[in-house]
Image (cartoon, helix red, strand yellow):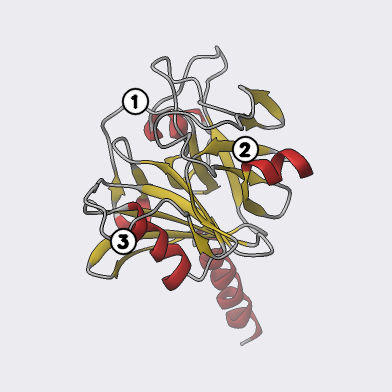
Amino acid sequence: MIRAVAILTALGALATEAQAVECRDFEHDKNRYTLCEVDTTQEDLRLFLRDDKAMPIGQFSAINTRLPDGQSLAFAMNAGMYHADRSPVGLYVENGKSEGRLLTGASKGNFGLLPNGVFCVEDTRARVIETLAFKKSRPNCTYASQSGPMLVIDGKLHPRFLPDSTSRYLRNGVGTNSDGTRAVFAISNNPVTFHEFGRLFRDELKLPNALYFDGKVSRLHAPELNRSDAGFWLGPIVGVVAPN
């Protein structure tokens, strides 16, 4: 009996470990999304951009081939805007090393639609931080990716989002809770407006801060759902590394 209990306990621990990320399909306000939720206190959340020859990695499959035996991506998605050479627009930090610089001024395109923000991964938490607040506090991010616009800022939608907008695209982004222990990554499965996407994070997920990653190139890797989007070569990629 004792041995049976020990086996069941071990199997339960393995099941918990294997469930590194919870991904699910979800509907909000007649729009379809896929959500992947990460416990940042437990999971190995990283950003990826270049290989050991400083070349952009670009695809989820290429990250998997570079990971040590016994590890793979439990989840991944594109994580910020990039130039034609796939270098990041704005600040990018990977394993403590910075590439690019923090951009604080307004500019053309979604990135420069202020306020924008930074997704910052620290030791046991991950936070979405508005850019000027990030500049002031300078958190010690092991990984970071600047993008824009912010979707939700301290519980409020971006002031430029219009309820009657007709600009619809596939979109992806991330929201975090107040203490940084919960990060929810979302991708729309049909074209949505910024206003609709922001309300997903604010009203349904109850997350006080959320950041837009991109639209046209939005891609998701979610093995739990038998999904791994191919297509455009990507710049920054966020993912959770877990045992196979």
Residue 200 vs 239, above or below: the answer is below
Mark 1 is on which residue type? Answer: Trp
Q: CA distance from mark 3 to mark 1?
A: 32 Å
Q: Quadrant of residue 197?
A: bottom left
Secondary structure under badge 3? Answer: loop
Mark nearer the viewer, 2 or 1: 2
**Mark 1 nearby-residue class (10 Å; few <14, some 14–19, many ≥20):** some
Who's the residue at 54% across and 44% down the image?
Answer: 115
Q: How many marks?
A: 3
Q: Residue 35 in the image: x percent, y percent?
A: 39, 60
Who's the residue at 42% across and 72% down the image?
Answer: 204
Return the mark for residue 233.
1
Return the mark for residue 105.
none
**Mark 3 nearby-residue class (10 Å; few <14, some 14–19, many ≥20):** few
User: Which residue does the numbered mark 2 point to in the structure image?
Assistant: 144
Mark nearer the viewer, 3 or 2: 3
Please tell me which residue lies in front, 191 or 2.
191
In the picture provided, is 189 more to the left or to the right than 117? left
Please tell me which residue lies in front, 130 or 80.
130
In the picture provided, is 150 more to the left or to the right than 94? left
Visible in this render: residue 91?
A: yes
User: Which residue does the numbered mark 3 point to in the structure image?
Assistant: 163
Mark 3 is on which residue type? Answer: Pro
In the picture provided, is 20 more to the left or to the right than 31? right
Q: CA distance from mark 2 to mark 1?
A: 20 Å
Q: CA distance from mark 3 to mark 2?
A: 30 Å
Who's the residue at 67% across and 42% down the image?
Answer: 132
Q: Quadrant of residue 225?
A: bottom left
Secondary structure under badge 2? Answer: strand
Q: Earlier in the sequence, mark 2 or mark 1?
A: 2
Secondary structure under badge 1? Answer: loop
Please tell me which residue lies in front, 1 or 183.
183
